[in-house]
Amino acid sequence: MDTQNSSTGSFKRYWRLLVMLLLLLLITAELFVRLIVVKLPRSTPALINRVYQATGDQVVAGDSQMYRAFLEQQDFVNLARRGNPIPAVKLTLEKYFSNKIPSRVVLQASPQLFSKPQLERNTQRYDAYFNLNMAFYKPYLFEKGITEFINEIKSVSQAYQLLMQSQPPEFEASSQAWLAMTDQQRSNRVRARVEHHMPQWQDNRTADYQRIYRELISGLLSKQASVCLVRPPVNAEYLAVTAQSEAYLQAELFFLELARDYNVRYVDFQELPIDFEESAFINQDHITPAASKTFSALVFSRCFDPHSSSGNR
C-alpha cells in the first residue's frame, strides 16, 4: 500500500509540475506576442492590436500614405497600414466598429487604390483575422493575424529593441535621404512609382473594388458616421506626371463623384493652404511626421468644420 501511495503521489506531483510548466510556457508566449510581436513596424499584428485596444470613435483608414499623413495626431485612431487595399480597409473598419458607434471617419481617396498590386492583395487575409474581437479577454496566442508573424523576429537583439521601443520608428523619418538624391534619381523613383500605382480600369476586379468602397461608405453613413474622403499628398513631379494620365484622372473623378453622390466631403491635398516642398517628403508619396502634423490638422478642419467649404470641386 505504501508503495502504491508513493507512486500515486509522485504521479500527481509530476502532473502538477507539467501543468505549471505548460502554463508558464503559455504565459511567456502570450507576453512575447503582446509586448514584442505587435511592435513590428507597420505590421498586421500592430494593426490588429490597435483594433483590439483602441477605444476612440474617430478613425483614419487607408494605406501607408494615409498612415504617414496622419501619424502626428492624437484625436483620431490611425487604422491605416502599409499596402492596405480597399477590401482590407472595409474589413478593418467593420471589425473595429462591430462594438463601437462611429463618429467621424476619414477614408483614403487615392488613385493607387485601383492599382495592380492593390487588386492582387485583395483582403490581405484580414477575413481570417480579428477572430477575438468580441471576446472580453483576447488571448493573442489564438489570433493567427498575430502569431503568423512571430517568424519576423529574427534575433534576440531585434526582440529586445522592439521590447524597449517607445514609439514606432516611422516617427523618426525625415527627408534627409530623399533630398540627398540627385534630381534624376528622384525623378526615376517618381516615374517608377507612378507606373507601379497605375489604376487598372480594364481589370474586372476594379469594378468589385468600387462596389466595396461604396458599400463601405453607405455602411458607415447608415451608422450615422460623418465620412470624409481624403487624397493624401504626393510630391510635385508625381502630381505632374499623373496629371497627364487618363487612368489617374479617371480615378480622381470616381472619388469626386462618389463624394457628391453620398453628400460627403472630399478633400484633395492640393486644395489646402500648404506648400508641399521636397523637404516635406521622405519619398515621392509619403510625408514626414512634421508635415503630417500640419496636414492632418487642416484636413480635420476642412472635413468636419461646418463653417468650412466642402472641398468638393
Image (cartoon, helix red, strand yellow):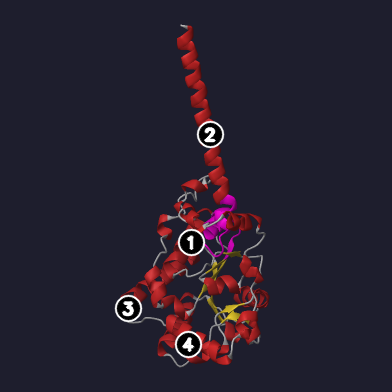
Q: Quadrant of residue 273?
A: bottom right
- Residue at 45%, 67% in the rendered image: 216
Query: In the shown orientation, is residue 225 left or right of residue 207?
Result: right
CA gap between label 2 and label 3 equals 54 Å
Instruction: Give the vertical position of 245 relative to 152 (above or below).
Output: below
Pointer 2 residue = 21
Pointer 3 residue = 203
Q: What residue range appears in magenta? A: 34-59
Q: Are marks 2 and 1 in contact (CB under 8 Å)?
A: no
Would you say residue 274 sits in the magenta stretch?
Answer: no
Pointer 4 residue = 191
Q: Which mark is residue 230?
A: none
- Disc nearest the viewer among 3 and 4: 4
- Pick whichever of labels 1 and 3 is earlier in the sequence: 1
- Pick whichever of labels 2 and 3 is earlier in the sequence: 2
Q: Quadrant of residue 137?
A: top right
Secondary structure under tag 2 reads helix
Residue density around tag 4, few if under 14, some if 14–19, many if 20 or more, within 10 Å? some
Residue 192: x percent and y percent? 46, 85
Pointer 1 residue = 92
Instruction: Give the vertical position of 191 relative to 304 (above or below).
Output: below
Residue 177: x percent and y percent? 62, 80
The residue type indicated by label 1 comes to Thr
Residue density around tag 1, few if under 14, some if 14–19, many if 20 or more, within 10 Å? many
